[in-house]
Image (cartoon, grey):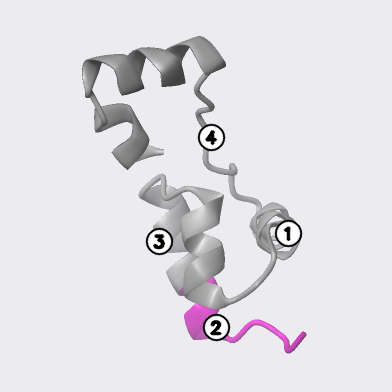
Amino acid sequence: MPYWSHEEENALRSMVEQGKPIEEICKVFHRSPEAIRLKIRRLGLEPPKTVRETESEKSYYKTHNNNTAHQNG
């Protein structure tokens, strides 16, 4: 994989500071989650927190047609 340009590093910093999820960042840079996490650590940044829904939460949202949580994460 090619090296990160200064522009990419700055964009990554911005996305991390905004709290964008790793999955979204991967799509922007066309890099693996591992590559993104490694670069975040090398830049001295705190990786974005990921939120995982439990199976019971997923079931609740399906039952109650409340897709808000699914849109956020």
- Mark sitting earlier along the chain (2/1): 2
- As measured in the structure, the alpha-carbon distance from the residue carrying label 4 to the one carrying label 2 is 26 Å
Quarter of the picture containing the C terminus is top left
Which circle's residue, 3 or 1, is located before the other in the chain? Answer: 3
Could you say which quadrant of the image residue 31 lies in?
bottom right
Mark positioned earlier in the residue sequence (4 or 2): 2
The mark found on residue 34 in the picture is none
Which range of residues does the magenta coloring cover?
Answer: 1-10
Residue located beneath label 3 in the image: 14
Q: Which residue is mark 1?
A: 42
Type of the residue with mark 1: Arg
Taking the image as shown, residue 61 lies to the left or right of residue 39, namely left
Q: Is residue 2 magenta?
A: yes
Q: Amino acid at mark 2?
A: His
Q: Which quarter shows the N terminus? A: bottom right
Can residue 44 be found in the magenta stretch? no
Residue 34 image-quadrant placement: bottom right
> Tag 4: residue type?
Thr
- The residue at 47%/52% (across/down) is 16
Disc 4 vs disc 3: which is toward the camera? 4
Judge by depth and name the residue closer to the eye, 30 or 55: 55
Q: What SS does tag 2 mark?
A: helix
